[in-house]
Structure formats: structure tokens, C-alpha cells
Amino acid sequence: MTEVKNPLVSSESTSAGDAEAISYLKQHVAGGQHWYLALLGAIGLWTSAEEVCNDRTYCYLIDGEAFDWLLLAERLCETVDGLLPEDEKNDLLFRGIPPLELQAGEVKKLIGERKYGHYLNYFYGVTVEEALLLAVQEEIDKERRVRGFRSQGESADETYQRIYNTTREVLLKLFRQEKRYAQLKSITLAELKEFTYWLFKYRLKRCEKAKIASDTKKALGYLKRQWQKRGVFKVLAADLPPEDAV
């Protein structure tokens, strides 16, 4: 396997590294290498932190440190459309199920240590933070059902109160003020990911270590249960600790 360690950097046009990544993917898929290994190798060669392609803006690196690897995987898969097994590609992009189970060392060698570290930032800062919100909301909904409340619509604010000690509305306003974004009624998927990563860092700054560890354990437990339901064994070999060791 070729070791590729290109970091992600800001770019306003297709860089030589990005063109090389696309060429690498096409050549290795056509040459018979498993498409997932070729994809990870291409991800390792990619250099742009964000780009505009076909009128769509792709932001691969949130806050300069959290690598949204599945978004880049989607972008790269489009360049070999028709050459990949459709079911395996869809499982990866839409369900987070990779076609091969790789160890962390193998993934790290293909995409590079720096990108792998940035991926872990995204995993814990976005994926796990989303899972924490869902896990706490699930707890609240169960409590409400036990108390005889059927409606679950009011649990969202309570979820944010329990985790961050304030409401989502207040947090979103603070986030947008800090980032100098417009205070809109709607939110895009890209901004939502960035907001989630901001929430992760907000929580780390304000919570005690014991609560952070407890919340992380809860979120990872929730994630693992969801993965088991979908048949997911790992997500890019994150080497997650056992639940009782979190």
C-alpha cells in the first residue's frame, strides 16, 4: 500500500493534489484494486479543505480540524460513477457501512496520520456529539412516556438544557455571533455540522471531566446500538474503547 499523508489546505480551485487523487482513484479501480482501498488512497492524496464543484460547495475540514471524510468520499465516488458496486457505494455513503473491515493502522497508512487525526476530531466532535443529543433525547422521551406524556415535541429544549445548561436557540445564536454568520431561521446541513462541532468544544470547555466521560460513554453506547441494528462493524476503524472503559 502506498503511504499518502497530504494534509487538507484551503483552495479556491482544483489543485494538482486533487487532480492526482481523482486520477489515482480512476486508475486503481480500473486496475482491479478493491474500490474502497482505492478510495482511501485517493482521500490520502486530496489536498483541498473546501471547493466548489458543479455549483455545490464542499467543506471537508470543519473549523480547520475536523475532517468530514464521507463528504469527500461522496465527491470522489462521483468521479468514477458507474465503476463501483452500487449497493456497496450506497451502503458506505448513506448508511456509513464500509465494504471492508480495516484496522486503524491500515486506514492511517492509506489516508495519512494527520488526516486520520482530523477524522477522529470529526468522529468525536460531530458523530458522537450528534449521538449524545439523540441518546439524551431518547432518555427524556422514555421518562415522559413513564409519566404518561405522549408528546415528544417538547423534549428537544430539555435535551440541550441537560447537556449544555441552556437552550438550542441560545446556543445557535452564540455560535452564529462568534462565527459572524447571519441569524437565519433555517440552517443548512454544512452549518449544522459546524454548529455540532462547536457544541462539542463548548461542552468540553464548560463541563467537568467526569460528566464529559459519562456523556461520551452514553453517546458511544447509543452509537454502537444503532450500528448493530444496521450491521455496521466499524466506521473507518476508529478503534473505539469498550463501553466500560470509556
Image: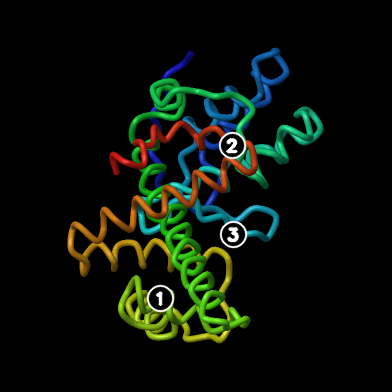
Count of marks overlaid on the render = 3
Residue contact at pointers 1 and 2, CB within 8 angstroms: no
Point out residue 140 in the picture as x, y percentages from the top left corner: 47, 73
Residue beneath the point at 41% across and 22% down? 109
Q: In the orientation shown, which residue stands out farthest toward the right?
A: 82
Residue drawn where x is 43% and y is 74% of the image: 159
Look at the image and tell me whether residue 22 can be seen. Answer: yes
First of labels 1, 2 by sequence position:
1
Q: In the rendered view, would you say 198 is above or below 246?
A: below
Q: Residues within 10 Å of mark 2 (few under 14, many from 20)?
A: some
Label 1 neighbourhood size at 10 Å, few (<14), some (14-19), many (20+)?
some
Q: Earlier in the sequence, mark 3 or mark 1?
A: 3
Residue type of the residue flagged with mark 3: Thr
Closer to the eye: label 3 or 1? 1
Kind of residue indicated by mark 1: Tyr
Q: Amino acid at mark 2?
A: Val
| Nearest the eye: 118 or 182 | 118
N-term mark: 2 or 3: 3
The residue carrying mark 1 is 160
Which residue has dot 2 on it? 232
Secondary structure beneath dot 3 equals: strand
Q: Which residue is mark 3?
A: 57
Kindly state the secondary structure of the residue where label 2 is placed: loop
Q: Position of residue 36 (x, y in %)?
A: 61, 26
Q: Residue 193, position in %: x, y?
A: 49, 62
Q: CA distance from mark 3 to mark 1?
A: 29 Å
Say left or right for 148 vs 109: right
The correct choice, above or below, for 84 with respect to 229 in the image is: above
Inter-mark Cα distance, 1 to 2: 28 Å
Q: Secondary structure at mark 1?
A: helix
